[in-house]
């Protein structure tokens, strides 16, 4: 309650907000950020939404997505900043340069590895999604939720619960979803765009990735490695790798699925997903990353084989294989 009150007071005191989220934003990052933008609109506040890279095509249906600006196009820093779904300042990428030195920053997040980098921290590791925290804040402030805000927040909730399949799907999650549907969300339209639709390049990348899918002797760990050559061959972008890790995690008997992706600068982005026992957030933290117990990530130096050896050693310890 105290954190909610501090966040509400911050929003009432300030104006001309900069809204930021993490690099390579997913459904909850964009859903919570754009849902928050609608909240500010309802409060009569001015705001700018900035991202490092263009909004992925699958999320361009979100209301206000066309108002999102690239960080490189914004000429000045902001004194009132809200960071959403971001565990630390590094995850803001180049957007961090838009935060004024004397800025007051509200940090809204649900990652348990969040390092409390804001002057005000509305962080709830028990929330299924950052969109759930934004929803609770809107209700706390008695801000009316319209169809546009509801669509953004539902998208965040849907994607971060894996279509209401992951272990973070609670009674509260379903109550929130029901309320958002009552505000006019079209659930099939959201699910089709956010979860089901694949581009041809994504299909080609899935084929590339599955050709090299590996499983350890215990059968509890599976992983996929994708390099720049494979991305180019598939005509795919880094954004097209979203969801690829699920093919490793979803194999019967596998507890931890991993995706190793070579980035343009030669570093290796590691995405970890677990089913029930292993806290992959703790593993990611060992390598300077973070996340949740069931979904986390980190970045290591290349080459990809070396990064895989280091991460797999820690994962094997965690699963006891």
Image (spheres, rainbow, N blue to C red):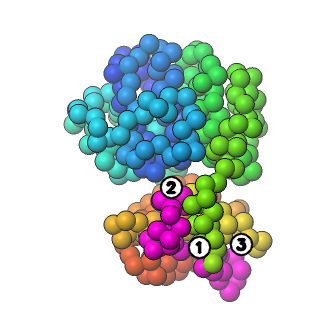
Upstream in sequence: badge 1 or badge 3: 1
Q: Nearer the viewer, residue 236 or 271?
A: 236
Q: Which residue is mark 3?
A: 254
Badge 3: residue crowd in 10 Å (few <14, some 14–19, many ≥20): some
Crowding at mark 1 (Cα within 10 Å: few <14, some 14-19, many 20+): some
In which quadrant of the rendered view does residue 49 lie?
Answer: top left
Q: Residue at x 51, y 23 (%)?
A: 38
Marks 2/1: CA–CA distance: 15 Å
Q: Looking at the image, which residue sits at the far bottom?
A: 217
State how far apart marks 1 and 3 are (Cα): 21 Å
Viewed as shown, does residue 174 lie left or right of 109?
Answer: right
Per the rendered image, the range of residues in magenta is: 212-241
Which residue matches tag 2? Answer: 239
State the image coordinates of residue 89 (x, y, percent, origin top left): 35, 47
Element class at badge 1: helix
Against 265, is 29 above or below?
above
Query: Residue at left 49%, top 78%?
Result: 308
Residue 169 locus on image (x, y percent): 72, 45
For disc 2, the neighbor class at 10 Å (few under 14, some 14 to 19, many from 20) is: some
Upstream in the sequence, badge 2 or badge 1?
1
Q: CA distance from mark 3 to mark 2?
A: 25 Å
**Residue shown at 58% from the left, 67% from the top:** 205
The residue that appears at 55% across and 25% down in the rendered structure is 137
């Amino acid at each position: 309650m105290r954190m909610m009150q501090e966040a509400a007071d911050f929003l009432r005191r300030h104006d001309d907000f900069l809204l930021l989220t993490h690099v390579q934003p997913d459904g909850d990052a964009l859903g919570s950020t754009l849902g928050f933008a609608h909240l500010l609109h309802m409060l009569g506040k001015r705001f700018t939404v900035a991202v490092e890279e263009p909004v992925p095509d699958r999320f361009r249906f979100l209301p206000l997505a066309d108002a999102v600006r690239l960080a490189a196009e914004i000429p000045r820093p902001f004194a009132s900043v809200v960071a959403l779904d971001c565990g630390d300042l590094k995850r803001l990428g180049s957007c961090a340069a838009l935060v004024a030195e004397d800025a007051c920053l509200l940090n809204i997040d649900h990652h348990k590895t969040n390092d409390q980098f804001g002057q005000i921290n509305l962080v709830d590791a028990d929330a299924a999604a950052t969109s759930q925290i934004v929803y609770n804040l809107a209700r706390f402030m008695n801000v009316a939720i319209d169809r546009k805000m509801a669509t953004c927040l539902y998208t965040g909730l849907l994607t971060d619960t894996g279509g209401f399949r992951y272990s973070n799907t609670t009674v509260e999650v379903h109550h929130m979803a029901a309320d958002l549907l009552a505000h006019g969300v079209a659930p099939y339209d959201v699910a089709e765009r956010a979860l089901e639709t694949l581009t041809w390049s994504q299909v080609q990348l899935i084929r590339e990735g599955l050709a090299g899918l590996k499983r350890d002797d215990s059968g509890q760990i599976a992983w996929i490695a994708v390099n720049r050559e494979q991305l180019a061959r598939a005509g795919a972008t880094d954004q097209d790798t979203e969801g690829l890790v699920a093919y490793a995690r979803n194999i019967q008997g596998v507890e931890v699925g991993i995706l190793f992706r070579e980035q343009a600068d030669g570093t290796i982005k590691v995405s970890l997903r677990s089913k029930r026992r292993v806290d992959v957030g703790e593993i990611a933290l060992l390598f300077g990353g973070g996340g949740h117990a069931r979904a986390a990530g980190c970045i290591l130096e290349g080459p990809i084989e070396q990064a895989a050896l280091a991460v797999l050693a820690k994962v094997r310890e965690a699963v006891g294989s």
